[in-house]
Image (cartoon, rainbow, N blue to C red):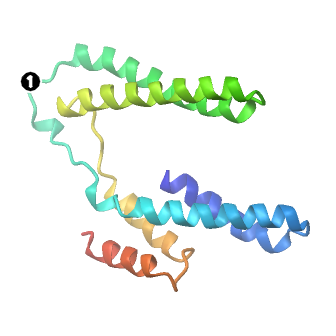
Amino acid sequence: MVAAQSNALIKFKKAYPKIKDPILKTIYKQTIDTLTQNIMELLQFYPLTPKTHRDEDESRDDASAAVAGELLGFAKTSIKSYALAITETATPSLRKVFKKHLNGAIDTHAKIFNYLYERNLYPASNHSKCKKRQAYRLLAFLPRSDSVFHYNVIIYKNWF
């Protein structure tokens, strides 16, 4: 999420000065502000990234991992599909049903992810170098006057 939103934020900030239509410019500004806030909120979770000791676990059940992995893939696809469907429908009652289904897919994903992770069957990997690079690049695009920015710099510096 951070990488995708960071890339979008960079593109939107570069495009913003060129936008002439005032309504579109307002929408862009709101989106830039929202993405900035989203990213600052998500950066707080970087130090909490789960670490796995999968290689040390000799009792893993690879057959269960395979079937559970299929369920996890289905849940992820369902989440993406419902999110897309919500943005494409113009019918409020159908949007409501899609939101209900999306929440169910999110719940399913959480259950199957936790099942896999607790049994060391899903390596929620620690991409510390990648995350560190992303955070460093991103800091250049966040507002420096904001106290949250300074908080995130402290988190980043104390991360490792």
Which residue type does callout 1 highlight? Ser
Residue shown at 51% from the left, 69% from the top? 138
Q: Quadrant of residue 112?
A: top left
- Residue furthest front in the image: 93
Apparent side of residue 12 relative to residue 43 in the rendered image (left or right): right
Apparent side of residue 68 relative to residue 38 in the rendered image (left or right): left
Establish if 12 lies above or below 59: below
Q: Quadrant of residue 25?
A: bottom right
Residue shown at 37% from the left, 77% from the top? 151
Residue shown at 52% from the left, 28% from the top? 102
* Numbered marks: total: 1
Residue shown at 39% from the left, 18% from the top? 70
Establish if 47 lies above or below 121: below
Q: Residue 123: give x, y in percent of width and height.
A: 27, 37
Q: Quadrant of the C terminus?
A: bottom left
Closest to the observer: 40 or 100? 100
Q: Quadrant of residue 153?
A: bottom left
Q: Residue 2: give x, y in percent of width and height.
A: 49, 56
Disc 1 is placed on an element classified as: loop
Q: Which residue is mark 1?
A: 59
Q: Residues within 10 Å of mark 1 (few under 14, many from 20)?
A: few
Apparent side of residue 160 relative to residue 4 in the rendered image (left or right): left
- Residue furthest bottom in the image: 145
Q: Residue 78: give x, y in percent of width and height.
A: 53, 24
Q: Residue 93: give x, y in percent of width and height.
A: 69, 24
